[in-house]
Image (cartoon, coloured by chain):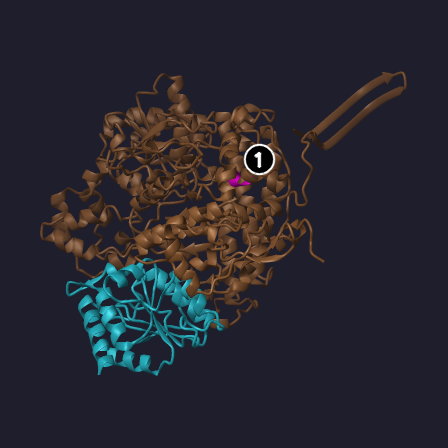
């Protein structure tokens, strides 16, 4: 487990993410949020753990946590295929752009998100969006639940193996079910 | 035609009216203005001339910044930490700093194309004279330089006229670059406006370069049936000496090809190219071959195919000469912008240079005379080919298996790979004797070689991948249509109406470099999808190559399957990077030839027309360079949306509309002066998309324009909905924003639409004569 950026050159961050050492810590922080959202990118169907695609872990997690999902790219169809309807879908740039707008009232119109979780975007794209949010959405907290350390997030898991990642997602799901 | 630097000197003259002695008259410029079109309001715009237009666009499509770095390191006050609202020692904040970086990228791009144009034009003036006439399409192309006419107000007729156009560009680029100096600008939007100006200037510089070379080198002149060119490593006859040209500037390659022709050697050697030089070589010499896009430099050099490597300018790997040295292939640097540390041998006798290169006394030379480049390259290739016998540095498959056992599985290769390729797993499998996972990486690898730089045990991972994929590499035998150049005026007349009314659903321009997320197949798939849907598909540069690098079920490449006409269902390669203005030019000519709008120095009106009426969208799926940034900026400035693939997010700034903000989408109805809400059409000006599927849906949507007739809108929506349902598995959620009257609804989808519109409390509205410019309103309401 390392808190170096997954892509080695992604180092130019003076304000770096606090590492999430245990999935239980992530759950505790998520539970404190009033309006969290979960942004799921196109790698959700390309990364596998225990022979299952990431998206299946995320559906379990979203069902348990009740966090509204925003699917980017063409992921909405992948969710629907698996019987889960995301709260919204739009491009990764669009959701980033809305999150930096303090007047935006969220996908349900009930208030600007106070926590945005990201997972499954191409690493460099996710890094850039998180950077944009760090600079231009000062009141927003961000968290990645990938297995790659993202310095521009508020909180990030360290670099970890697929096995660690699968376990973390399952623990988080279980904790929300409790 | 304009004459420059006219000198009249009279020693002594006696006439009935007097006696003149020692009269000397010097005139800077004589302007022959026989062009009857009246001059518009903004000829040769300066930095702020079109600022109001820029601000209209930037207000509609606000920048979304994603800084790559929290710091500014550009002056000695710094480094300054600009995180989250902090200002640096100069007072700049991260928003302005981000836009400053955009301006820098666009200025570098514009300077590069304009510098390229300057070299080409100076060389051609020296060779053919200032009065050499421009001809880009004979009688088929009367509007020879639409971008130049539009921006500068100049109608160039000769090579000499282009000199004046370039002087304008050079002046603007100097000013633009100066704006990036510390303490020159404070507002992010003003930086952005200047980035748009850089794009305008860039389009002019590119157009100058291309019309000069088309006219003098007799490239295909607006020819839909430009020849099909062999493409791919598998097409190269390696029994012959091979000269490989890399870069963008065709002038040294012309020297090579001319020397071969003059000495009856045209079929005795292979001249192949990588990147835009390849495209332009084959516009000049249809026996030239395109090896592939920019990202294949290492692949081809290490594979030992080239006997001589000729490097000109732009996008040339800085280590290309070092790699060539490894395979004992001499290098000729042929551009003053890319001297590579070699000794300048321009004035030495050719045979002396040849002897030094063949003997290995020197690994490379700098030659700035293109004719001498030709002679030296050909002679060296002939002499060295039998000596080097296509020596390569690729390991054998057994060596790969053995070397892979030394891999420490540290993951640094993957963590340095832009594609995040799972190289460690492939190496592990290779160590166990299974090379299939390495072979699988071949298509996605962009050939940057960062994996090798990171490897602590110095494994040549890129070479492993190339060797494992060698079978595919050697089977690459495809076709690319030679760059046709401009679109004919008559073609514009034929399709201008259907484009503006929306009945041709859109123009898709697939341009730019090869920094693809998953290989070039996505480019082929996207082009084919939209050609089958009867869009007009235009290509250029490395994307034009990738589009032609795959085949359909019948074994036909894209350029064999579809015609090269500027017509519904056509797939036309306009040419190299500097040919991109033919794409912008086609949109401009729709406004000029079809809609009879004046072009001359009339930028704002024409851009407003294009933005509201011409359903064009650019896709730079693998854009990587500063030049790609400036090319995109030239399209933004015309109001044409541009999509980039996921790596394009590293341009760090998007220009995004907000479909959820109704107030952002009002235009004037030029008939009445009423403000009419036209919905988010087009929704964005610059957007990164993650996947091929997302790109396809976005392209269909971004072709929607306020001016679409109900029939045109209905056609466009049917494509948008069809792609959305197929690729997203559901109906679009924003359809109500694009329906103005029930006639807009595609006939076969009436029931589905009706339910959606009822749920959204939709109200009918009018189809306006749309404009963002109040001055275009014909009758303003009291």
Q: Is residue B778 left or right of residue B195?
A: right
Q: Nearer the viewer, residue B303 or B107?
A: B107
Viewer-side residue, B93 vs B342: B93
Q: Quadrant of the C terminus of chain B?
A: bottom right
Does the magenta segment cover residue B57?
A: no
Colour of chain B in the image: brown
Q: Horizontal and vertical percent for residue B521?
A: 29, 44
Decide: is B415 above or below B39: below
Q: Secondary structure at mark 1?
A: helix
Nearest the viewer among B72 and B758 is B758
Q: Which residues are the magenta region?
A: B584-588
In which quadrant of the rendered view does residue B482 lie? top left
Q: Which image quarter is the N terminus of chain B in? A: top right
Dominant SS type (magenta): helix
The one nearer the camera, B226 or B531, is B531
Q: Residues within 10 Å of mark 1 (few under 14, many from 20)?
A: some
Residue A153's x, y, as percent?
Answer: 36, 71
Q: Chain of mark 1?
A: B
Query: Which residue corresponds to mark 1?
Result: B593
Where residue B58 appears, as percent x and y from the top left, is 55, 58
Task: Residue B520: tell me if it is visible.
Answer: yes
Residue A9 appears in the figure: no
Colour cyan maps to chain = A
Farthest-out residue, left: B432
Q: Position of residue B387 (x, y in %)?
A: 24, 28
Residue shown at 30%/48% (left/top)? B446
Q: Is residue A114 above or below residue B564?
A: below
B552 sits to left or right of B401: right
Q: Give the side of residue B701 with respect to residue A41, left or right.
A: right
The residue sitting at 40% across, 47% down in the picture is B620
């Amino acid at each position: 487990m390392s808190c170096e950026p997954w892509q080695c050159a992604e180092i130019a961050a003076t304000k770096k993410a606090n590492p999430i050492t245990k999935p239980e810590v992530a759950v505790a922080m998520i539970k404190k949020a009033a309006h969290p959202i979960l942004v799921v990118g196109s790698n959700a169907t390309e990364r596998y753990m225990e022979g299952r695609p990431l998206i299946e872990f995320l559906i379990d997690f979203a069902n348990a946590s009740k966090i509204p999902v925003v699917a980017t790219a063409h992921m909405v169809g992948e969710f629907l295929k698996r019987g889960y309807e995301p709260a919204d879908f739009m491009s990764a740039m669009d959701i980033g752009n809305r999150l930096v707008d303090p007047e935006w009232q969220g996908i349900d119109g009930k208030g600007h998100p106070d926590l945005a979780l990201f997972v499954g975007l191409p690493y460099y794209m996710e890094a850039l969006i998180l950077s944009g949010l760090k600079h231009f959405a000062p009141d927003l907290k961000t968290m990645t639940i990938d297995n790659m350390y993202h310095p521009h997030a508020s909180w990030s898991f360290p670099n970890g193996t697929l096995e660690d990642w699968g376990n973390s997602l399952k623990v988080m799901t279980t904790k929300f079910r409790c | 035609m304009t004459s420059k630097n006219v000198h009249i000197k009279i020693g002594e003259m006696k006439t009935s009216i007097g006696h003149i002695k020692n009269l000397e008259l010097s005139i800077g410029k004589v302007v022959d203005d026989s062009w009857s079109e009246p001059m518009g309001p903004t000829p040769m715009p300066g930095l702020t001339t079109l600022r109001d237009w820029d601000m209209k666009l930037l207000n509609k499509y606000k920048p979304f910044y994603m800084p790559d770095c929290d710091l500014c390191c550009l002056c000695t006050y710094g480094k300054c930490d600009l995180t989250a609202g902090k200002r640096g020692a100069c007072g700049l904040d991260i928003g302005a700093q981000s836009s400053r970086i955009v301006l820098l990228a666009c200025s570098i791009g514009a300077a590069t194309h304009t510098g390229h144009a300057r070299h080409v034009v100076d060389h051609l003036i020296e060779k053919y004279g200032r009065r050499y006439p421009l001809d880009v399409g004979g009688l088929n192309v009367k509007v020879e330089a639409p971008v130049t006419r539009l921006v500068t107000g100049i109608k160039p007729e000769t090579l000499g006229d282009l000199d004046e156009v370039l002087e304008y560009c050079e002046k603007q680029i100097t000013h633009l670059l100066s704006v990036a100096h510390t303490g020159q600008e404070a507002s992010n939007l003003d930086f952005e406006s200047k980035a748009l100006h850089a794009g305008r200037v860039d389009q002019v510089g590119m157009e100058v370069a291309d019309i000069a070379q088309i006219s003098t080198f007799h490239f295909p002149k607006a020819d839909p049936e430009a020849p099909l060119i062999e493409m791919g490593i598998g097409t190269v006859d390696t029994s012959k000496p091979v000269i490989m040209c890399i870069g963008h500037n065709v002038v040294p390659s012309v020297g090579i090809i001319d020397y071969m022709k003059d000495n009856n050697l045209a079929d005795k050697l292979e001249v192949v190219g990588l990147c835009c030089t390849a495209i332009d070589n084959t516009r000049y010499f249809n026996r030239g071959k395109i090896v592939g896009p920019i990202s294949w430099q290492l692949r081809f050099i290490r594979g030992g195919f080239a006997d001589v490597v000729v490097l000109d300018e732009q996008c040339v790997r800085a280590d290309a000469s070092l790699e060539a040295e490894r395979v004992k292939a001499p290098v000729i640097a042929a551009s003053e912008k890319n001297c590579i540390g070699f000794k300048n041998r321009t004035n030495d006798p050719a045979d002396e240079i040849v002897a030094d290169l063949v003997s290995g006394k020197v690994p490379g030379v700098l030659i700035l005379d293109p004719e001498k480049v030709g002679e030296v390259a050909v002679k060296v290739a002939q002499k060295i080919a039998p000596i080097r016998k296509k020596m390569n540095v690729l390991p054998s498959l057994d060596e790969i298996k053995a070397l892979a056992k030394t891999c420490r599985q540290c993951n640094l290769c993957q963590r340095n790979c832009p594609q995040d390729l799972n190289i460690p797993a492939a190496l592990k499998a290779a160590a166990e004797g299974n090379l299939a996972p390495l072979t699988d990486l071949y298509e996605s690898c962009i050939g940057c070689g960062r994996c090798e730089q990171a490897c602590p045990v110095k494994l040549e991972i890129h070479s492993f991948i190339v060797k494992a994929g060698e079978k595919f590499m050697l089977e690459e035998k495809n076709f690319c249509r030679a760059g046709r150049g401009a679109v004919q005026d008559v073609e514009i007349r034929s399709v201008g109406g259907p484009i503006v009314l929306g009945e041709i659903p859109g123009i898709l321009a697939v341009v730019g470099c090869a920094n693809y997320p998953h290989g070039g197949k996505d480019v082929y798939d996207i082009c084919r999808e939209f050609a089958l849907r009867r869009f007009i598909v235009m290509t250029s540069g490395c994307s034009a190559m990738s589009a032609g690098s795959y085949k359909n079920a019948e074994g036909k490449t894209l350029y064999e399957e579809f015609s090269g006409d500027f017509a519904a269902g056509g797939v036309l390669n306009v040419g190299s990077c500097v040919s991109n203005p033919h794409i912008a030019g086609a949109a401009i000519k729709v406004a000029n030839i079809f809609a009879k709008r004046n072009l001359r120095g009339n930028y704002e009106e024409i851009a407003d027309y294009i933005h509201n009426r011409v359903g064009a969208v650019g896709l730079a799926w693998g854009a990587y360079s500063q030049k790609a940034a400036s090319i995109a900026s030239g399209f933004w400035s015309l109001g044409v949306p541009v999509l980039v693939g996921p790596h394009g997010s590293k341009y760090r700034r998007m220009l995004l509309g907000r479909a959820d903000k109704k107030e952002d989408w009002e235009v004037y109805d030029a008939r009445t002066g009423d403000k009419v809400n036209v919905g988010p059409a087009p929704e964005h000006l610059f957007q990164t998309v993650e996947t091929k599927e997302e790109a396809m849906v976005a392209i269909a949507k971004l072709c929607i324009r306020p001016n679409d007739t109900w029939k045109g809108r209905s056609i466009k929506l049917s494509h948008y909905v069809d792609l959305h349902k197929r690729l997203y598995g559901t109906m679009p959620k924003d359809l109500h924003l694009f329906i103005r009257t029930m006639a807009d609804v595609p006939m076969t989808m009436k029931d589905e639409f009706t339910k959606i519109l009822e749920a959204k409390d939709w109200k009918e509205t009018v189809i306006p004569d749309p404009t963002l410019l109040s001055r275009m309103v014909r009758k303003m309401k009291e």
